[in-house]
Image (cartoon, grey):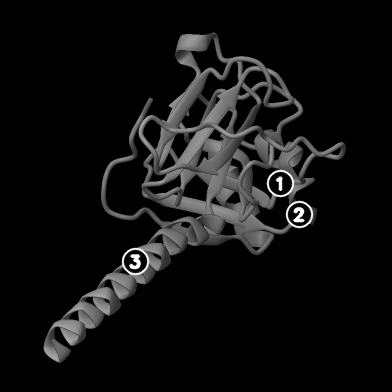
């Protein structure tokens, strides 16, 4: 009898431990997504210059002042989903809703999209959440330039540098790297694997 109680108690402890580990694993998947990057590019192939948003909380609507040709999501993980919209307020029917890291090109939408947000959802089918649209839209975290070679990206972090975007976009590709270097940009080599395109 005593042995039966012990076995039952041991089984309950193992079960509770397993549940704790599963919850910890799930929270880590979602918490680790605070480093999600969303980049709005002028070009339609996730290259060239663009505004980068890093570390924004999920459900925050990121809005650009003008329409963009492509949007890239980096670091979303398996449970991170992104919704893209034609309007500036993340409202109406999304033009795309996808999971994980992706380059979303607006070729099939006549190049029109300028707002997006990400959210965590491990369920199937996903359960979309309502975005949070702040009166004053979030300021980009910096500017980015990806050469046509796709060997990596030049990133100039800092919200104050986001104001320099208009200068960067008017330079030739050959001038952009020198300009970024002179302003303290860092080069991040491309990681292995091909960017998924949608």
Q: Nearer the viewer, residue 46 or 121?
A: 121
Name the residue at 43% across, 31% down: 98
Seen from the viewer's position, the closer of residues 198 and 44 is: 198
The answer to which quarter of the image holds residue 197 is top left
Quick one: 155 or 174, which is closer to the camera?
A: 155
Residue 25 position in % (x across, y down): 37, 64
Where is residue 54? Give x, y as percent.
61, 53
Occupied quadrant, residue 131: top right
Can the viewer see residue 117? yes
Instruction: Give the vertical position of 25 relative to 126 (above or below).
Output: below
The label number, if any, that marks residue 140 in the structure image = 1
Q: Secondary structure at mark 2?
A: helix
Residue to which mark 2 is pinned: 159
Which mark is first along the chain, 3 or 2? Answer: 3
Image coords of residue 88 (percent x, y):
73, 24
Check the picture and name the quadrant holding the C terminus.
top left
Mark 3 surroundings: few (<14), some (14-19) or many (≥20) residues within 10 A: few
């Amino acid at each position: 009898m005593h042995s039966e109680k012990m076995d039952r108690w041991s089984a309950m402890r193992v079960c509770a431990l397993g549940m704790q580990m599963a919850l910890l694993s799930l929270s880590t998947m979602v918490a680790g997504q605070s480093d999600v990057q969303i980049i709005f590019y002028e070009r339609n192939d996730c290259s060239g210059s663009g505004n980068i948003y890093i570390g924004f909380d999920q459900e925050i609507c990121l809005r650009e002042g003008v329409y963009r040709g492509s949007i890239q999501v980096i670091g979303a993980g398996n449970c991170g989903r992104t919704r893209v919209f034609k309007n500036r307020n993340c409202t109406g029917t999304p033009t795309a809703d996808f999971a994980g890291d992706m380059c979303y090109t607006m070729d099939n939408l006549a190049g029109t999209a300028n707002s997006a947000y990400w959210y965590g959802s491990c369920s199937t089918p996903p359960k979309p959440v309502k975005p949070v649209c702040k009166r004053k839209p979030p300021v980009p975290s910096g500017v980015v330039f990806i050469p046509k070679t796709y060997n990596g990206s030049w990133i100039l972090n800092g919200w104050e540098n986001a104001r320099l975007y208009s200068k960067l976009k008017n330079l030739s590709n050959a001038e952009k790297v020198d300009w970024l270097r002179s302003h303290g940009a860092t080069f991040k080599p491309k990681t292995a694997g091909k960017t998924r395109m949608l």
